[in-house]
Image: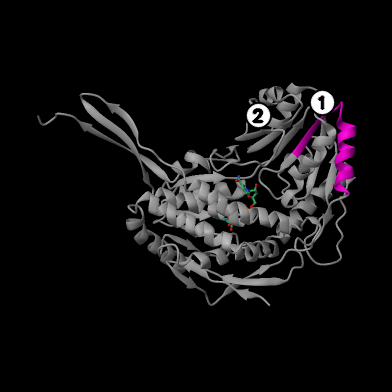
Amino acid sequence: MAVKYSNLIDGEMVQTADMLEVVNPANEEVIGLVPSCGADELDRAVAGARRAFKTWKSTPVDDRRAVINKMAEAIKENFDELFRLLTAEQGKPHAQAQMEIGAAPAIMQAQATLNLDEVINEDSEERLSRTRRVPVGVVGGIVPWNFPVLMAVQKIAPALLSGCTIVLKPSPFTPLTTLRIAELWKDIVPAGVVSIITGEESLGPLITAHPDIDKITFTGSTATGKKIMEGASKDLKRITLELGGNDASIVLPDADVSKVAEQLFWSSFSNAGQICVAAKRVYIHEDIYDELSQAIAEYAKTVVVGDGAQQGTGVGPIQNKKQFERVCELVQDAKDNGYKFLVGGDVDPSGSGYFMPITILDNPPEDARIVAEEQFGPVMPLMKFSTTDEVIQRANASDYGLAGAVWTGNPEKGVEIAEQLETGTVWINEYLHLSPFAPFGGHKQSGFGAEYGVEGLKEFTYSQVITVKKNAMA
Ligand code: NAD
């Protein structure tokens, strides 16, 4: 039976007359009902955030850290319930849901240790000039459905640490775990400091346009990011945009096939490929292409696609119908064009759930839609290359610039290539490793601004320079 969830608005748990249905992507059953908020509820949340900002911004930073730590502890204490709920609404296998629910409090607690130190610009006989960081005010946070909990907390923690208050909107596809966490936080966070509200797709633009929100921090698609930038331009809201990617993984001829095949597989297929920094284009040197592509294909055949709640599942369903149809369309386009499949490609139309088989393509052309567009699904195109210059040029020939990877027996060579890639992150011989202490962000149409680290924290503040002329009145 579908459980009714509430929003956290200005310290109170709130429901609306109309509720939205949330579906389990593994069986298409409605598992939850969430509030359908509009302008009235948003106004209430923003007014509460504005009121709370007055005291929260001057609450000692160590007290703010303590609240964030308690919020993180609440997630840890309810780990079991939360990871199961996350699998039910998002589709990812239990082991991957455990990683997300485990990472969320760890990231919050790591972010809570950061400091925004004042900078002395000048301390001379004439004057003292210093730069301090001031919280921008009320933040609107908007997050996607692929890592709903992680994306939410990695915005909430630094917003609170900086002294801002936040109104956060989960994706309508995956709001349940976040709302359950909001309930756990109700008596930990002062009223208005964090509000979490849900609604239809029309709620996002209301947040972007709200005159009393000072900043938008957004993670989602590039198409929506552009709309947010346009909406935020009306009153020049500050924005941080973490958008889509089409990451290239480059495998040099000296890579050890037996060591990289499995890792390459998971760099594309974790969370059924629905990761902004998943490897979405895999370039393999021609000398090892046949051997490595066969090894990846053989490994792929051992991985089970199914309901993430069932033991043994490695790849779950696609999270929602719209995305499922989009990935099916890209695969169909590849078929229509006669591209070769090493594994998968045929969707079984019987049964419920948005399941797509693990699909690996054998050297499709660079301009194939399945290569040029962000697939965001369990699809991996493998492509051959001959020279380093050629592969760097192909990797960079994308509107996106989020991340990338180089696999090689010679890490120095890997770094040399990394420095020529036009992306915010490059991994050598690993993938998906993000640190709460290092800035993460995109280049080109993957967005701008950063999350994590001091750079990410600064995004919630503006700099104020205070200059004191010494001995002026002497
Ligand atoms: P999406 O852009 O469709 O939706 C993201 C959020 O924006 C949702 O909460 C949605 O309700 C809201 N939204 C939709 N239209 C809006 C509008 N006009 N104004 C304001 N808000 C609006 O993205 P998605 O499909 O949920 O997520 C997948 C995308 O997110 C992929 O492109 C992926 O690469 C990207 N992503 C990026 C990162 C990153 O850190 N760079 C991380 C995760 C996902």
Count neighbours of disc 2 (C-alpha within 10 A) and say few if under 14, some if 14 to 19, many if 20 or more. Answer: many
Task: Identify the residue shown where x is 59% and y is 38%.
Answer: 442
State the mark number for residue 253.
1
* Residue 36 as seen in the image, left or right of residue 285: left
Task: Identify the residue shown where x is 22% and y is 28%.
Answer: 127
Residue 147 appears in view: no
* Residue 74 as seen in the image, left or right of residue 380: left
Residue 181 pos. (x, y %): 55, 64
Using the image as rendered, state which of residue 367 and residue 136 is in the foreground.
Answer: 136
Give the structural element (helix, strand or loop) at label 2. Answer: loop
* Residue 351 as seen in the image, left or right of residue 200: right
Task: Identify the residue shown where x is 44% and y is 46%.
Answer: 460
Using the image as rendered, state which of residue 285 and residue 187 is in the foreground.
Answer: 187
State the mark number for residue 52.
none
The numbered mark, 2 or 1, whose residue comes first in the sequence reads 1
In the rendered image, the vertical position of residue 352 relative to residue 101, given as above or below: below
Magenta part of the protein: which range?
281-301
Give the structural element (helix, strand or loop) at label 1. Answer: loop
In the rendered image, the vertical position of residue 340 relative to residue 153, given as above or below: above
Q: Nearer the viewer, mark 2 or mark 1?
A: 1
The Cα atoms of the two marked residues, 2 and 1, are separated by 19 Å
Count neighbours of disc 1 (C-alpha within 10 A) and say few if under 14, some if 14 to 19, many if 20 or more. Answer: some
Using the image as rendered, state which of residue 81 and residue 338 is in the foreground.
Answer: 81
Residue 221 pos. (x, y %): 62, 49
Residue 392 pos. (x, y %): 71, 26
Q: Quadrant of residue 173?
A: bottom right
Q: Do callouts 2 and 1 mark residues in contact (Cβ within 8 Å)?
A: no
Q: What residue type is disc 2 on?
A: Leu
Mark 2, residue position: 421
